[in-house]
Image (spheres, rainbow, N blue to C red):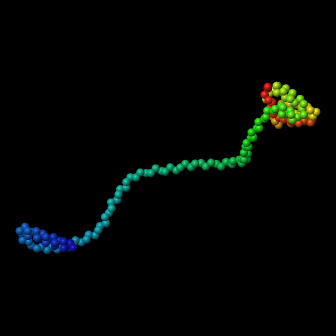
Amino acid sequence: MRQIAVLALAALVGTLGACSGATPTPQIVYVTPAPTPTPTPVSTPTATPMPTATPMPTPTPTPTPTPTPVSTPVSTPTPTPRAKPTPTPIAILDPAVVCASTTYRRCLDSFALITSMVPGELVAVCEYGGHTGDIVLISAVGQAKDECSASGTISPSRVVAVGRLPSAP
């Protein structure tokens, strides 16, 4: 293939020479291809290693101390607090109504006397045998029975009513 290209080139050169007025002389040039050179191993240049940064050692995380298991005392469940009942308001006693329900003869007179002395106080109206009775001061409704019987020394005794005395007239 190289021979053909060279011959064509030589013919072209000869034709050009004829144009210039010179007598062309055909020239045949034989070109033999050069032996294919055996490829020599190309040594790849060794790259000079680039300086690399020395990596910092990765800090190891400080272990979190695990809490020492502490035996927790077994606790007794606390009872759920119950709603305290709203105390029933203590009624103000009406002497006429209370005294109408007892055999205590001097009930209205006793009411007038004690109301003049301690108006608004908590009292128990007590009835004893023989048409007698009393009106006694108490600090709690639950004390009425014990106060009317004088801790069991007065018998028979009955609690007729418990309540607050009316305000002074």
How far from the left and from the top, in percent, is residue 80?
72, 45
Position of the N terminus by quadrant = bottom left
Work out whether residue 101 can be spotted. Answer: yes
Toward the viewer: 120 or 16? Answer: 120
Toward the viewer: 157 or 109? Answer: 109
| Location of residue 100 by image quarter | top right
| Location of residue 137 by image quarter | top right
Furthest toward the right, the residue is 130
Q: In the visual, does 54 lie left or right of 129? A: left
Q: Residue at x 11, y 73 (%)?
A: 26
| Location of residue 18 by image quarter | bottom left
Toward the viewer: 104 or 54? Answer: 104
Q: Is residue 55 above or below residue 89?
A: below
Give the total number of marks visible in the rendering: 0
Q: In the visual, does 144 lie left or right of 37? A: right
Q: Is residue 152 above or below residue 24?
A: above
Work out whether residue 147 can be spotted. Answer: no
How far from the left and from the top, in percent, is residue 84?
74, 41
Furthest toward the left, the residue is 21
How far from the left and from the top, in percent, is residue 5?
18, 71
Position of the C terminus by quadrant = top right
Q: Residue at x 37, y 54 (%)?
A: 50
Q: Residue at x 81, y 32 (%)?
A: 94
Q: Residue at x 90, y 35 (%)?
A: 157
